[in-house]
Image (cartoon, helix red, strand yellow):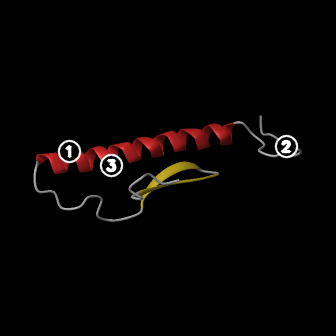
């Protein structure tokens, strides 16, 4: 899962969920306050999307078996 900027990636496994940065530069060059506000708001929106995805994956993992016939750890 990535956001609109393709700057972050959500990864999950048996140890839980985490967000990784895909790129080292997270913003372009900003020339004024409006550029800064826009760039940072877009990063916040992407991180919020990552948080929702992480919570969804944690919820899926906590429900147990994903396929019929698999034992659920309840």
At x 78% / y 39%, what residue is drawn? 73
Q: Which residue is at a point 23% across and 61% down the rendered structure image?
A: 28
In percent of width and height, residue 71 lies at 85, 43
Along the polypeptide, which appears first: circle 1 or circle 2? 1
Q: Residue tagged by mark 3?
A: 43
Q: Position of residue 69 (x, y in %)?
A: 89, 45
Which residue in the protein does label 2 denote? 71
C-alpha separation, residue under disc 1 versus residue under disc 2: 49 Å
Outermost residue to the bottom:
24
Residue 53 percent coordinates (x, y)? 53, 44
- Label 1 element class: helix
Most foreground residue, 47 or 62: 47
Number of other residues with Cα within 10 Å of mark 3, as a class: few under 14, some 14 to 19, many 20 or more: some
Q: Earlier in the sequence, mark 1 or mark 3?
A: 1
Name the side, left or right, on which 40 lies relative to 20. Answer: left
Mark 3 element type = helix
Q: Is residue 49 above or below residue 23?
A: above
Q: Residue at x 11, y 56 (%)?
A: 31
> Mark 3 or mark 2, which is nearer the start of the sequence?
3
58 sits to left or right of 27: right
Q: Quadrant of the C terminus?
A: top right
Residue on which the image places disc 1: 37
Examine the image and state in which quarter residue 7 appears: bottom left
Mark 2 residue element: loop
In the image, residue 62 above or below residue 31: above
At a point 28% along the width and 64% down the height, the residue shown is: 25
Q: Quadrant of residue 62?
A: top right
């Amino acid at each position: 899962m990535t956001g609109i900027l393709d700057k972050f990636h959500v990864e999950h496994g048996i140890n839980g969920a985490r967000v990784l940065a895909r790129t080292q530069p997270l913003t372009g060059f900003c020339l004024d306050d409006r550029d800064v506000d826009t760039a940072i708001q877009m990063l916040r929106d992407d991180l919020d999307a990552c948080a929702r995805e992480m919570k969804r994956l944690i919820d899926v993992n906590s429900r147990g078996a994903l396929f019929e016939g698999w034992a659920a750890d309840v």
